[in-house]
Image (spheres, rainbow, N blue to C red):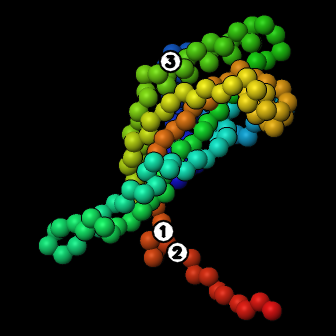
Amino acid sequence: MINKTITHIINNLNDYLGGILDPGLPSYKDYYAVLGHITKNSFNSGNQKIIVNLINIEEDKVYKNHITPVATTGNTTFPLGGVSRMRINLYLIFAFNPGEDNTSYANALTLLTHVLRYFQANQSQDITITGPSPVTFNLEMCYHNISLEDSNNMWSNLGGEQKPYAMYKLQLLEIDELSPQQVPTINSTTLL
């Protein structure tokens, strides 16, 4: 579900950027932004323009105790019973390829500006995850400020060379438990 959610956001972002920068192409899939792990050599091929990396997952404590009521007989709900869902926030970093010259760096900053504009105009998105039981939910995208010290620590952990970037917090993705039909059978053995 996390992968499908991030991929959906990247596909929408690619369509937005393609409509502005390269209108008329038949597909913008993975044209500007790709889901990937940021490393020291992420941009060596020169083809990638934006790498989107999941930096952190945070359980939302505010909604932790909210319970979704379960319908009982007579179409009434029992307010004290129900299913609690895990609600999480995702922190995504959008790293931009600075290239090797001033023109490439300027292009990276232009892309950064367009990404900021996109999320400013689309702060809330309805996401539909297809599958055996489709799920539709709303995600709120908020720019996430981090201090210069935290930025330095983050880039040190990612490989050392800082790139132009933007970080967004996506809130509230609900993680449901598996239905009984989806739970894999676990064979237990006695360990001595």
Q: Residue at x 69, y 25 (%)?
A: 147
Q: Amino acid at mark 3?
A: Arg
Q: What residue sits right under mark 2 in the picture? A: 183
Where, by quadrant of the figure, is residue 104 drawn?
Answer: top right
CB atoms of marks 1 and 2 within 8 Å: yes
Q: Position of residue 96 (x, y in %)?
A: 70, 23
Q: Position of residue 38 (x, y in %)?
A: 75, 36
For the residues labelled 1 and 2, the Cα–Cα distance comes to 6 Å
Q: Residue at x 44, y 40 (%)?
A: 139
Q: Which mark is residue 117?
A: 3
Q: Residue at x 70, y 9 (%)?
A: 106
Q: Compared to 117, does 156 lie above or below?
A: below
Q: Considering the numbered disc 1 on the image, is that residue within a helix, a strand or a loop?
A: loop
CB atoms of marks 1 and 3 within 8 Å: no
CB atoms of marks 2 and 3 within 8 Å: no
Q: Residue at x 62, y 17 (%)?
A: 111
Q: In this image, 145 relative to 174: left or right?
A: right
Q: What residue sits right under mark 1 in the picture? A: 178
Q: How many marks?
A: 3
